[in-house]
Amino acid sequence: VDFTDVKPDISVTKTASVCSVPETGANVDFTFVVTNHSAEAVTLTSLSDSVFGELLSGPVTIAAHGKYTLTITRWIACHSSVLVSQGPVASCPPACTYHYNVVTATAYDSEGNSDTATDDARVDFTDVKPDISVTKTASVSSVPKSGANVDFTFVVTNHSAEPVILTSLSDSVFGELLSGLVTIAAHDSYTLTITRWIACDSSALVSQGPVVSCPPACT
């Protein structure tokens, strides 16, 4: 009675624990399940991910009609057009709208026959809106009508988890205070202090800088 060779037959599934994460990043669990559909054991020799690389530390034997499951946790985030992970760094789509990767499983039987299977997973990035606040303080609460120097301090705070670009810091009296763009890191702040001479004579406010009207009583 002749024996006919039974070829290995495997499949692989890859799933992410969430469908989307903020573009600023979050941990995601990726679960890989390799199923042996044949009636004899196979040796899983490779489980390679297009982003995270080889996931096996060595060969794994999967019994007939058995399964092998592996879960990994990776931090994925998207800033501009670069995908950052705690592990390999890979490019993401130009619009930086999602993370995508493919896993390939390869297994052999005892006769040296092989089978491969692939599956993919996608995690979308949700937009994180900028969130800033600004405070303005004067170094003194009052000056003589004849005038004095006053320090004005402006603090712009970035409350979001990604950098923002400060394009304008405009004062109703002193005008635009920035000489160029300023990048403020996540959860950081930008501070600017200017010194201006302010004085009130008759009904006009005189400053070393812009000249403006002050209240009629010059208070």
Image (cartoon, rainbow, N blue to C red):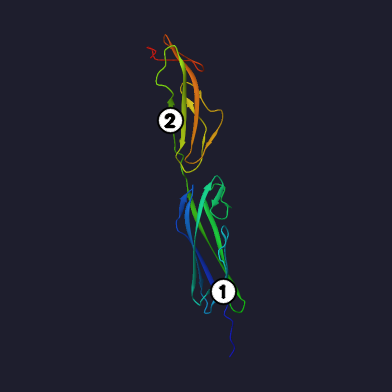
Up the image or down, 88 lies above or below 104; here it is above
Measured in 3D between alpha carbons, the distance from the residue under mark 1 to the one under mark 2, in whole angstroms, is 64 Å
Q: Residue at x 46, y 52 (%)?
A: 20
Q: Residue at x 47, y 56 (%)?
A: 28
Indicate the position of residue 26 as horizontal and vertical percent values. 47, 51
How many labels, in total? 2
Task: Kindly state the secondary structure of the residue where label 2 is placed.
Answer: strand
Question: Please, what is the three-letter code of the amino acid marked with disc 2?
Answer: Thr
- Most extreme residue toward the right is 112
- Amino acid on which disc 1 is placed: Thr
Q: Residue 43 — which label?
A: 1
Q: Quadrant of the C terminus?
A: top left
Place residue 57 in its image quadrant. Answer: bottom right
* Quadrant in the picture for the N terminus: bottom right
Q: How many residues crowd mark 1 within 10 Å: few (<14), some (14–19), many (20+)? A: some
Which label belongs to residue 117?
Answer: none
Give the x, y percent position of residue 163: 51, 40
The quarter holding residue 2 reads bottom right
For residue 135, the mark is 2
For this rendering, which residue is in front, 140 or 106?
140
Image location of residue 120, percent across then percent down? 53, 60
Comparing labels 1 and 2, the label whose residue is closer to the camera: 2
Q: In the picture shown, does residue 166 fall above or below 26?
A: above
